[in-house]
Amino acid sequence: MGDEFRGWSEDFQRYFVGLQLDNSKRYFEANRRLYEQEVRDPMVALLRSLEPEFGPSKLSRPNRDIRFSKDKSPYKLNIYGHSPGGYVSLDAKGLVAAGGRYQMEQPDVIRYEIGGELLKRVPSPYPQDHPRARLLRHKYLIYWKNFGLQPWLGSAEARDHVLEVWRDGDDLGRWFKRYVG
């Protein structure tokens, strides 16, 4: 694998479409080299190229955790990575770049007015008829840009688009770091 991010070849889409049609170990093993070279390695290179500005990154595993799931499909239909600066995902439909705060703890939720996934009830100590009950029932705040399939996915320009989304979210990230932790 080369260290410089150059984008993804069109083969990434072929891999994901094939996996959607045959989500099996047999398919994955038959296409492992395609996954590693055309899906995983470019994502690793992209994440590494963003680390100097956004910090250490982590890459998802291709395997799903099926222990407690009704869906026993063994492989994820996308690849994604994240860092303190944001989240990026690639699948058969294209590229998504995002950021924000996910799965906030209850003390953080009740201290701030944020938007995101709704809780069923307003967390205590607030009354259920609180004037900002709708906001208090949220657990996360995210932003994202779904680029879909673009010709520039096959070039280093894809990095520029992820970088733009992550930089746009810097103010929000600083706010979370200052007030939420």
Image (spheres, rainbow, N blue to C red):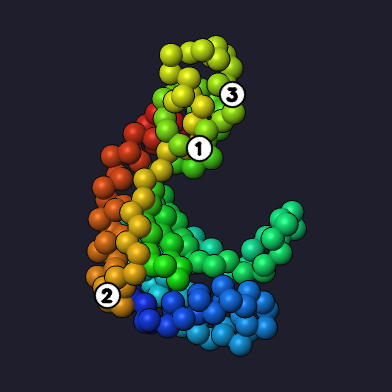
The answer to which image quadrant residue 115 occupies is top left
Q: Residue at x 25, y 55 (%)?
A: 164
Badge 3: few (under 14), some or many (20 or more) residues near its Cα, within 10 Å?
some
* Residue 158: percent from left, percent from top: 29, 68
Residue tagged 1 = 117
Location of residue 122 in the rendering, given as x and y in whole percent from the top left corner: 55, 21
Q: Which residue is mark 3?
A: 121
Identify the residue at image location x=63%, y=74%.
23
Q: Residue 137's x, y, as percent?
A: 51, 27
- The mark nearer the N terminus, 1 or 2, is 1
The answer to the question of whether label 3 and label 1 lie on touching residues, with beta carbons closer than 8 A, is no
Residue occupying image coordinates x 68% and y 78%: 25
**Amino acid at the residue labelled 1:** Glu
Query: Residue type at mark 2?
Result: Pro
Element marked by disc 1:
loop
| Residue in the image at 55% along x and 12% along y | 127
Q: Quadrant of the C terminus?
A: top left
Amino acid type shown at disc 3: Arg
Q: Which residue is mark 2?
A: 151
Instruction: Determine whether the residue tagged by mark 3 lies in a helix, strand or loop.
Output: loop
Please determine whether, in this image, residue 2 is positioned above or below residue 67.
below
| View extreme (front): residue | 21
How many labels, in total?
Answer: 3
Position of 178 compared to 36: left or right? left
- Visible residue check, residue 56: no
